[in-house]
Amino acid sequence: MMFSLQKEGAMVSTQTVTAMQRAQQTLDRAFARLGTGQVETSSSVNRAIHQTKADLTAEIAAQQSRINGATRDEGRSLTAVDAYSEAETRYLQAAAILKNSARDGATVYERQTAVAEAERIHASIDPLYGNKLFEGEQVAFQGDKLGHLAPTGLGTGRDVSLVDRIFYAASNGADGFELWSSTGGVGSELAVGDIEPGPLGQFTAGTAPTWAAANGLLYYTASTAANGTELWRSDGTKAGTFLLSDLTPGAPSSTISNMVELKGSLYFTLSEGTDHYLYKSDGTAETTKRISKISSGSAPKYFTSLDNNLYFVSQTPSNGIELRRTDGTLSGTSLVADIRPGAASSFPEYLTPSGDKLFFTALTSTGGRELYVADKTGTRRVADIYPGSTDGLPITPTMFISAVKGGVVFTAQDPTAGMELYYSDGNSVTRLTDLTPGPADTSFGGPTRAAAIGDKFAFAATTSDGFYAPYLTDLAGNRQLITSDDGDALTFSSHFVAAGNYLYMRAAEAGAPGSRLYRVDPTTAKATAIAGTQDIPFVNQTVIGDKVFATALKSGIQRTFVYGPDGLYQVPGTISQGYAILVPGLTGTRLQQSADTLTAAAVNVSSQRQAAQWAADRAGIVQQFHAGIKTVAEQAKQQVSVADPQNELTVARDASERLQRGSASLAAEAQAGAFLAGGLQDVLKAAKTESEDLQARRDAKLQEAKRQQRSKLLRGEVTTPPARPVTAGLSTIGLQVDTSRFDPPPVQPAYRPVIAPIKLAGATLT
């Protein structure tokens, strides 16, 4: 059992309380002896007080030590809280960066840049922890490493499916066109495999291959004598390149089209006559399966992935050719909107995803072809740019719709401005240019002569003086003319390509022979010529990070080139078939998975932060607790320190002597009182005897009077009864005395001085 003196939660230790009790008992015994006339020296009292002060001093030091320890614990805990809070913030920052880069439409360069930034943030988290904050505590979260998402570079020594690669068809001159791959670096080209030995090859010169990237793999159709045209896959190595499934067994070919990635899987269509079926594959023969029949009649087209759905255009007898959507499941295909109700068709074109919206054009009998948008709220026409049945967005060779910052830039016409450049965010439409004032059309170059970079848009148009000039505009219509470094005008030749932080284009400068490749800084609208590019007409340009993979006819032979911020590089020893495709290793699925990992890490350190905050709060309470104990002990020590035992003993002796003298006087007074009480008792007895005698004589006289009255009545001497005799004056006379004895006067208690015990409000014994 612990004796405690509580004050605002404070508790004094048992040892200290025992010492205080021992001191009080010693004083009690000393003063008790004084009450009996004994005199006690002060030595025992002094010893008790000295011991009490020593115990209290030790108690105060012990509580201060505990306060110091709690203060250190609180400081460490608060440091941990700060570290965990900062780590949580950085984890969430890195997760947000990766999640944003996982969105549909993000470029490889954006993803590479995002991963580099996420890894920089991730690397900055570990130093926050320093040494372990608490003994035995594991602070670092395990499993949040991002090594598999390191910036790609050349990808040496890494899983090839995690590396961004360009796949292209090329020939070494002796064999036909086969599959090659490159990471974009000098000397990184690799012949994936000669699956059809001899001069034929698996690709046809000048014919665009049917292929698509999905989850780090290339899926493509290739032809062999044994299997015809079927579905193949490759991870960039010879061992990882093989026939995936012979969907039409034997030498006959399968009609495969519309390859597209959705949620890390490949989806494609297989046509059998007028029936068209949706298939799915995850890279193995076992996972390559038919999902459902999605169309009859004309073949479905324009498959576009957005928001975990595939949008496409297909025909049914009841709805005509309209926009449809599938989530890739047997029952997940549905009509998005029947823009022209019934069997009539709206013929959707130019499906362009941007942000969480799908932009496209559609035709109605009363509104012509206009801009439409589909999102989670539904499908709607954005605007009737050319009122009435005339097309606002006619299908022409120079017509284009390009995604920019969640919206689109596109060419359209209206009655007052002719063909010009417009921007829409899906809610409204803004005209960006009127390069040819009035209703006359401005001549644009088409989709290859326009490109978005950041929140700006590059395009080429013929000016009023006849020059075909390159421009940059923001989404508010603020336009800049792109010029050379020294400010000279440039005549646009062909192809805007955005790669990394730059735009690339072919242009000619006044006074310089021929055309060449220029690198454009979009922040200044200044263009720098790239050496060695004069009169090389690049085509089929594919962006990989901040580089561009392209083909061009040089000395009569189709060659493969790579250009970028470091200049131009020609891939040696091969003849290009003319087409290439980027297969990102940093897929949206993998980036999202890493973002989820970082989010989980943030949740983990958040719980650790809360635990550290609780520890800090507990340490603060402990400080207050022991500070209260210390205060109690200090107050007790002060009380003991001000006690003067010698003076108390002197006062006690004087009080004892006065008590003894008072007791003798009270005894004498008590004896006199006893004598007085005896005399009074004798008087009382005499008065009682006198009273009894008087009563007896009165009774005798009364009896005699009664006897005489009866005698007279008998003799007839009295006819009426006599009046009653008066007895007044016969009452007892004498002193009225209180018969109770006198109590002795109260005896005053002996004086008993004590040292005031230590008392606190609400003291309890537990």
Image (tube, helix red, strand yellow):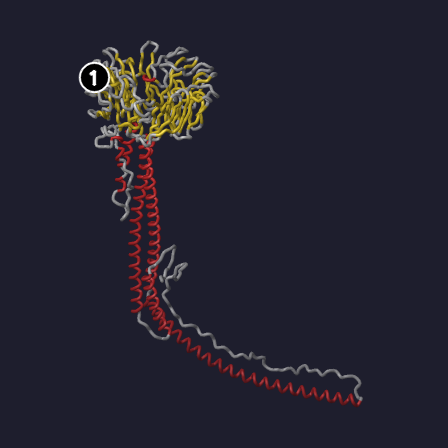
- What percent of the width, then of the height, locates residue 329? 39, 31
Q: Identify residue for label 1.
A: 532
Q: Is residue 568 visible?
A: no
- What percent of the width, then of the height, locates residue 18? 33, 64
Q: Residue furthest front?
A: 250
Q: Residue furthest top?
A: 465
Q: Is residue 637 above or below residue 126?
A: below
Left or right: where 646 falls relative to 534:
right
State which quadrant residue 512 falls in.
top left
Image quadrant holding the C terminus, namely bottom left
The kind of residue tagged 1 is Gly
State which quadrant residue 556 falls in.
top left
At 43% from the left and 13% from the top, the residue drawn is: 416
State which quadrant residue 253 falls in.
top left
Q: Nearer the viewer, residue 221 or 385?
A: 221
Q: Nearer the viewer, residue 510 or 199?
A: 199
- What percent of the width, then of the height, locates residue 654? 36, 72
Q: Is residue 732 above or below residue 248?
A: below
Image quadrant holding the N terminus, namely bottom left
At 33% from the left and 9% from the top, the residue drawn is: 465
Q: Nearer the viewer, residue 335 or 674?
A: 335
Q: Is residue 701 above or below residue 549?
A: below
